[in-house]
Amino acid sequence: MKQTRTHVLEISQLTAEQMDIELLEGYMDMLEGRTKSAESVFSDMRKDYNFVI
């Protein structure tokens, strides 16, 4: 799953309410199975960005 945001989320600029919303969205993604293994994420990074770990 690629990140679909059109801008970078700068958490230092979020209000407490906005941070709560972001955390809840991530938690709901996890509960609903919208997750990837770390192995898969690093594999995609290597492939997409020639990223070496």
Image (cartoon, rainbow, N blue to C red):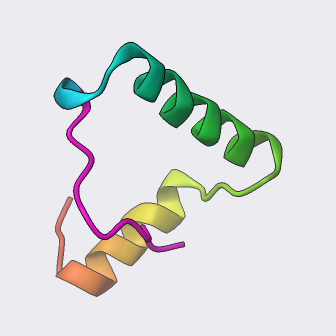
Residue 3, given in percent of the width and then of the height, sits at 42, 67
Q: Which residues are magenta?
A: 1-11
Query: At 28% from the left edge and 27% from the top edge, which residue is drawn?
Result: 14
Identify the residue shown where x is 61% and y is 59%. Answer: 36
Residue in the picture at 45% in, 73% down: 2
Quadrant that contains the N terminus? bottom right
Residue 47 higher or lower than 26, as above or below: below
Rendered-image quadrant of the C terminus: bottom left
Residue 26 location, x and y as percent? 59, 40
Extreme residue in the right direction: 32
Does the segment drawn in magenta span residue 20? no
Residue closest to the eye, 40 or 8: 8
What residue sits 44% from the left and 71% below the top?
4
In this view, 47 is above or below 23: below
Question: Considering depth in this image, is 32 or 48 the residue closer to the camera?
Answer: 32
Q: Position of residue 8 (x, y in %)?
A: 22, 55
Expressed as whole percent of the image width and height from the top left, the position of residue 28 reads: 73, 40
User: Which one is nearer the viewer's eye here, 6 or 49?
Assistant: 6
User: In the current view of this chain or complex, which residue is farthest to the top?
Assistant: 16
50 to the left or right of 26 = left
Number of disc labels = 0
Q: Majority secondary structure of the magenta segment?
A: loop
